[in-house]
Amino acid sequence: MSNSNLKVLFLNIFLVLFTAARSSVRILQLNLIEIETTIKNVGLKIPLVPEVLTLILSCFVVFKFILSYLSLAAHIVALYPILNYELNDLLIPTIIMQAIQNILLNLGELWCGYIICHNYLDKDSTACSIFYIKILAKCTLGIIVLNVFWNYYSSLRYPELEVIPNRKFHKRISQKQVQDIKIFQRRMILESSEVEMNSEVFSNT
């Protein structure tokens, strides 16, 4: 197994364990309580605004919680093409979930946080600055992880575009290429046997 395969394998296993640890109903409950408590502590005086913000943020957190289980299933399924170098289409759900969770949802969270900080909080406060840095860091890491899985998917789908190190055959070849190699080997064996037979005939004559 090459270094790139080990990198994708360890990254996928880490994401499986991390997602499984975060996909807890207890953690979801604590997040919902934290949202309600934080909005109450802000002390918004506008009618219905605290309730609306609580509802929107709670729905957002529940949606992320549901997606975490879908992401966990996608990462478990992705173990097969990573270990067997075939059925590369099984990596597509993982790539889609990575794009949704690590990019789209983080951008949505950034948009919601910007509205809250700009309209209801002090936009120059330390809490808002920490929030922006945290979201940008999550987006950056999400793009890096997505790029790793996409490159691995491309290497499985188009093995002929991958650079083969040290001029050796790469392990990740398609079934058609395996059949072509076997046919070529059989032809070489037949040709060598014909040459030996011809040489024996000439020697007897």
Image (cartoon, helix red, strand yellow):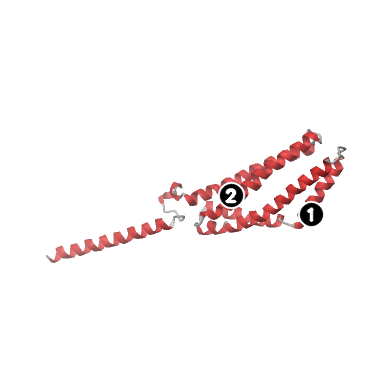
Closer to the camera, 97 or 138? 97
Which residue bears the numbered disc 1? 29
Picture disc at residue 145: none
Residue at the far bottom: name it: 204
Q: Secondary structure at mark 2?
A: helix
Quarter of the image for residue 10 reads: bottom right
Could you tell me which residue is drawn at 48 percent across and 51 percent down? 157
Could you tell me which residue is drawn at 76 percent across and 45 percent down? 56
Residue 160: percent from left, percent from top = 43, 49
Which residue bears the numbered disc 2? 95
Please say whether residue 7 is visible from this viewpoint: no
**Residue type for callout 1:** Gln
**Residue type for callout 2:** Ile
Q: Left or right: where does residue 153 sit relative to residue 185?
A: right
Residue 189 vertical position relative to residue 120 in the rendered view, above or below: below
Closer to the camera, 63 or 117? 63
Quarter of the image that includes the C terminus? bottom left
